[in-house]
């Protein structure tokens, strides 16, 4: 498992929230961070945030991730649905991106958040088959089935922890920036109803999926995403710009907060 030694390096973490097509916001924010020279050391993600976070942990730039999304079909709901219909599934689709990679082959520490159907507990993956673990984090109904890992079934991490800043903190980050695509979602009641219909014996509870993210982050970027949904693929350019300008407007405050935290930890 990746873990930074706090005594040797001040580390920056990025917690990337779930939101399907709204993940384009992440790419815009990453572009702004790159332009401002703000580099992150550890990454944690839920759902689409897990895909983006994993690619960041591989060392890819925002432009490279955007190109992979287009080439891999992750930015098109039609291609995603065909992956499910043909039996390829999200794990098969992501295997095209990640191959047989494991977490320890990444350039940076990374955590992918999912939920165990049987226990209802959050699962934070930091080792194992990268494609399967990220796929588990992205397995949201009605688009994708649960993903089986070591005999256990996992679904989308957004059912418990939609902005996993705490996972980034637990990887050893001293300062964590979160990106919330959910307008600080307070309840999983709607998603839980779909989950109960598909998996009647699941133990996943209704909860506030944003709570841990807001408690654990040192700075949260939370653009107004009202009017956009997880399937707003026709608006990815607009959402990219929203993420870009939200991050740009936050840079000065983030850098000030980072310096303050550095001083506290001296």
Image (spheres, rainbow, N blue to C red):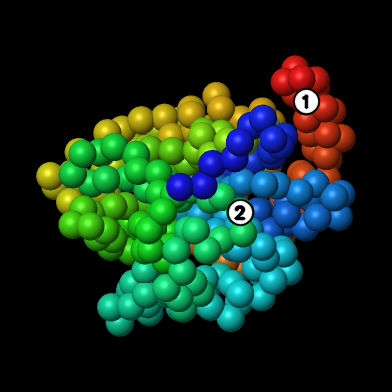
Front residue of this view, candidates 40 and 47: 40
Q: In which quarter of the image is residue 78?
A: bottom left
Please indicate whether residue 210 sits to the left or right of residue 263 in the image: left
Q: What element carries label 2?
A: loop
Q: In which quarter of the image is residue 142?
A: bottom left
| Residue in the image at 71% along x and 37% along y | 9
Disc 1, disc 2: CB below 8 Å? no
Q: Residue furthest toward the left?
A: 201
Q: Distance between the residues labelled 1 and 2?
A: 21 Å
Dot 2, crowdedness within 10 Å: few (<14), some or many (≥20)? many
Rendered view: 169 above or below 98: above
Image location of residue 95, percent across then percent down? 42, 74
Q: Position of residue 26 (x, y in %)?
A: 65, 53
Say which mark, if any, is on residue 262: 1
The mark nearer the N terminus, 1 or 2, is 2
Q: Which residue appears farthest toward the top when viewing the image?
A: 264
- Residue at (29, 37) in percent of width and height: 121
Q: Which residue is drawn at 53% across and 78% down?
A: 72
> Looking at the image, is 19 positioned above or below residue 232?
above
- Mark drawn on residue 2: none
Residue 98 in view (yes/no): yes
Please, what secondary structure does the residue beneath circle 1 have?
Answer: helix
Q: Is residue 18 visible?
A: no
Classify residue 52 as left or right of residue 194. right
The residue beneath circle 2 is 108
Residue at figure coordinates x 61%, y 63% from the top left: 58
> What is the crowding at mark 1: few (fewer than 14 residues within 10 Å), some, or many (at least 20)?
some
Query: Picture coordinates of residue 246 (x, y %)?
Result: 76, 44
- Residue 121 lies left or right of residue 92; in this view the side is left
Residue 125 screen position, x and y as percent: 40, 49
The quarter of the displayed image where residue 5 is located: top right
Say how many tags the image has.
2
């Amino acid at each position: 498992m990746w873990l930074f030694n706090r005594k040797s390096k001040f580390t920056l973490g990025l917690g990337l929230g779930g939101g399907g097509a709204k993940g384009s916001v992440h790419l815009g924010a990453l572009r702004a961070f790159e332009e401002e020279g703000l580099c992150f050391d550890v990454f944690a993600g839920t759902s689409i945030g897990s895909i983006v976070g994993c690619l960041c942990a591989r060392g890819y730039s925002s432009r490279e991730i955007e190109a992979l999304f287009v080439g891999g079909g992750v930015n098109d709901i039609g291609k995603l649905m065909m992956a499910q219909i043909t039996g390829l599934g999200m794990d098969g689709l992501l295997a095209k991106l990640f191959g047989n990679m494991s977490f320890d082959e990444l350039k940076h520490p990374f955590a992918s958040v999912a939920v165990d159907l049987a226990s209802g507990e959050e699962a934070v993956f930091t080792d194992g088959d990268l494609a399967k673990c990220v796929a588990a984090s992205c397995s949201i109904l009605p688009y994708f089935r649960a993903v089986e890992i070591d005999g256990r079934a996992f679904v989308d991490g957004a059912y418990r922890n939609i902005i996993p800043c705490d996972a980034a903190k637990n990887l050893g980050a001293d300062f964590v920036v979160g990106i919330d695509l959910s307008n600080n979602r307070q309840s999983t009641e709607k998603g839980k109803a779909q989950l109960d219909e598909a998996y009647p014996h699941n133990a996943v509870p209704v909860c506030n999926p944003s709570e841990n993210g807001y408690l654990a982050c040192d700075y949260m970027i939370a653009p107004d995403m009202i009017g956009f949904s997880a399937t707003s693929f026709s608006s990815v350019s607009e959402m990219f710009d929203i993420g870009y300008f939200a991050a740009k407007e936050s840079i000065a405050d983030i850098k000030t907060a980072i310096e303050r935290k550095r001083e506290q930890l001296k």
